[in-house]
Amino acid sequence: MFLENVAKWKDVYIQEGEERGEAIACGRLLQILLEDRFGTIPEVVNSFIVSSDSESLTSLFRFASKAPSMQAITDHIKGMQALS
């Protein structure tokens, strides 16, 4: 019984690690995109990037690739946070 629980916990930790790794990679790519398009990234945007999951970051990446300004991205993040 104990060994079965350990195996389940191990699987959960592995999955959580993979999900966090994916979020870190998505966040880094998003930072590169934003820096290339707009220069310095505001702290509110950086904070959102480091605290978000890969699904939220992918959504923001899609928006950011077409956004007209960093202000539009900041406003979009505020809207995403309001929905949470």
Image (cartoon, grey):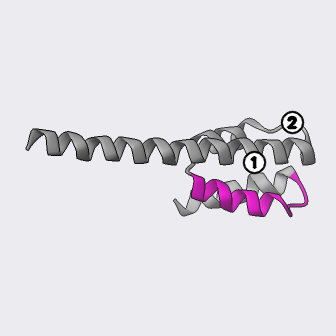
* Residue 23 located left or right of residue 35: left
Q: Position of residue 42 (x, y in %)?
A: 78, 38
Q: Earlier in the sequence, mark 2 or mark 1?
A: 1
Residue at horizontal 77 percent and vertical 42 percent from the top? 31
**Marks 2/1: CA distance?**
13 Å
Q: Position of residue 58 (x, y in %)?
A: 67, 58
Viewer-proximal residue, 62 or 14? Answer: 14
- Circle on res. 40: 2
In the picture, the quarter occupied by the N terminus is: top left
What span is colored magenta in the figure?
54-69
Residue at horizontal 86 percent and vertical 64 percent from the top? 66
Say which element carries label 1: helix
Residue at horizontal 62 percent and vertical 39 percent from the top? 50
Give, as a three-letter code, the residue at label 1.
Leu
- Circle on res. 68: none
Viewer-proximal residue, 31 or 5? Answer: 5
Residue under numbered circle 1:
30
